[in-house]
Image: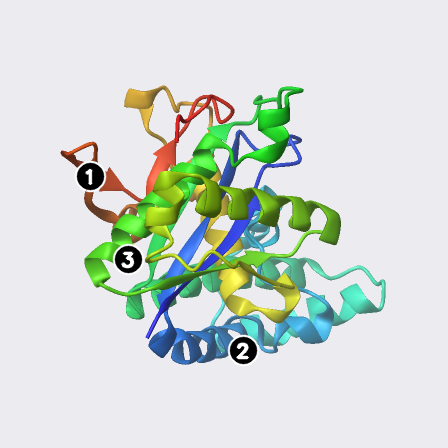
Amino acid sequence: MSWLLFLDESGHDHKHCPYEVRGGIAIHAGKLWPFVQQLQGAEIASFGAPLHEYRKEIKGAKLLDKDRFRWADQDEPMNDSARRKHCRGFLTKGLEKKAPTRTEFTAYGQACIEMARSVFTALRTFNSTLFASVTPATSTKPDTQEADAFLRKDHVFLLERYFYFLQGQKEHGLLVFDEVDKVSDRRFVRRIERYFERTQTGRFRAERIVPVPLFVASDMSLPIQAADLVIYCVNWGFRLPSLKMDNPGRTEISVEFGPWINQLQYRGQGNREGRVFDSYGIVYVPDPYELEGE
């Protein structure tokens, strides 16, 4: 059986996040359905109902917004029954365009953080592996034919880490992306095809990575939503100061979820030009448009 790498992005609008992050979580096909079932149960346990019934989904920017932490800290932690009851009140009033009560705000904030914890717990339970490439939010695309036609360096490194992981597992892997819009998605698919068809390294890595990406709507895919949450936490709560990846983050996210990120990210060995080196699932690329030479 195969692995599926569910991928999303964070900070690509260059508005609020300190970095651009593309990445996600690899889950074995044999564990995918139990993983989804555990997330479905976690939604009920946290909020008292599935979020899609209220036109919401699991997203890092929503669950872990600064306001959610502030709301959660307004009062002592509620018991499960009370939190779910007041959460349903909060969500229902959102549909009705009514103002929630203070207690309902508190319940919803606590439920959001509890759901985020449940996502990381499920990822660990089903032996998921984290991969992410990080670049400065200030990166600008040069006006060149190469930048339009070929994969960015950070994307190449992301595929490299996934390939090393699949080599170690002796299995094949699929790429599953959150769909954005058909025009930009088609452009991205063409860049991926060029990489796997026209570069020697890409052709070699196609022995493990299936070079035909799949696209799904995030509101229909809990694994994509989980990937969104995780890379949001990478953006705000994971730093590599030794590589000058030191833009300000958010302490509440790094303290709560930083240890989970360290535990989930891929660790293995890579091989380039006969040189064996330690390889990690999270890679920082200061200039994503620097030519990789592949």
Residue 256 on image: x %, y %: 37, 48
Say above or below: 144 vs 227: above
Q: Earlier in the sequence, mark 1 or mark 3?
A: 3
Say above or below: 118 vs 24: below
Q: Which residue is mark 3?
A: 166
Q: Helix or strand or loop: what does disc 1 sit on?
A: strand
Q: Is residue 84 left or right of residue 161?
A: right
Residue 237 on image: x %, y %: 42, 38
**Mark 1 residue type:** Asn
Dot 3 alpha-carbon crowd within 10 angstroms: few under 14, some 14 to 19, many 20 or more:
some
**Mark 2 residue type:** Ile
Give the Cα separation between the discs numbered 2 and 3: 34 Å
Q: Split into 4 quadrants, where in the image is the C terminus?
A: top left
Residue 253 on image: x %, y %: 43, 43
Residue 271 - label: 1
Residue 225 on image: x %, y %: 55, 61
Q: Could you tell me if the residues under marks 1 and 3 are in contact, i.e. CB atoms within 8 Å?
A: no
Whether residue 189 is visible to the viewer of this picture, yes or no, is yes
